[in-house]
Amino acid sequence: MNIVIADPKSGKSFTKKTEEAVFVNKTIGDEIELGIIGLTGYKGKITGGSDKQGFPMIKSLQGGGRKKLLMKHGVGFKAKIKGQKKRKSARGNTVSAEIMQLNLVVTKHSSKAIEEFFKTVEVEEKKEETDESAKERMVKQSLKNVGNMELAEEAKSIKGKVKK
């Protein structure tokens, strides 16, 4: 589950990935302790989210299931023509195991800045990405070199046949 935490104090948002489904059976608008995900001393409010297939959570729809709604406006639909209605699928306001992204906003701050919780994680992720991209680049370059050598040998053999 990806948890997107918006900090209105700094105007930044941070992403925290968890393997297990946290905040199950909580609804949109509930205030929760963020110590469960490693942000000790912080409290947040659930503002929305989306499920595995990308369908958004809607505050007015009770439950955790997906339903087809006839919409005039709102989350997941913006009318292009005045008076337009459309039937759209949406997820209820309760967090379940199917939720893949959960949006939170910080309501109570701790003495420790929120950037400090995410600073070390960002550096490690960037280092891993650069290591992986360097390996991929080296593999691509070696494959290109092998391909060029094979083409050069083939060209030499064709050139030898043409001269004879």
Image (cartoon, rainbow, N blue to C red):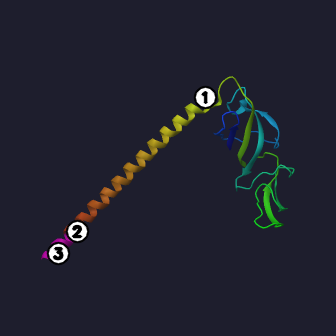
Q: Quadrant of the N terminus?
A: top right
At horizontal 70% and vertical 53% (from top left) the residue drawn is: 52
Regarding residue 124, the answer to whether it shows in the image is yes
N-terminal of the pair, mark 1 or mark 3, is 1
Query: Judging from the image, what secondary structure is the residue with disc 2 in?
Result: helix
**What residue sits right under mark 3 in the picture?**
161
Q: CA distance from mark 2 to mark 1?
A: 59 Å
Which numbered marker is on residue 155?
2
Determine if the magenta segment contains residue 22: no
Instruction: Report the front residue among 15 and 164.
Output: 15
Instruction: Report the front residue among 109 and 150.
Output: 109
At horizontal 81% and vertical 59% (from top left) the residue drawn is: 73
N-terminal of the pair, mark 2 or mark 1, is 1
Q: Is residue 114 above or below residue 100?
A: above
Magenta span: 157-164
**What residue sits right under mark 1 in the picture?**
116
At horizontal 72% and vertical 26% (from top left) the residue drawn is: 41
Query: Judging from the image, what secondary structure is the residue with disc 1 in?
Result: helix
How packed mark 1 is, by other alpha carbons closer than 10 Å (few <14, some 14-19, many 20 or more), is few
Query: Judging from the image, what secondary structure is the residue with disc 3 in?
Result: helix
Q: Is 9 left or right of 146, judged from the image as shown? A: right
Regarding residue 97, the answer to whether it shows in the image is no
Q: CA distance from mark 1 to mark 3?
A: 68 Å
Which one is in front in this view, the residue at disc 2 or the one at disc 1? 1
- Residue 148: x and y in percent read 29, 61
Name the kind of residue labelled 3 in the image: Lys
Which one is in front in this view, the residue at disc 2 or the one at disc 3? 2
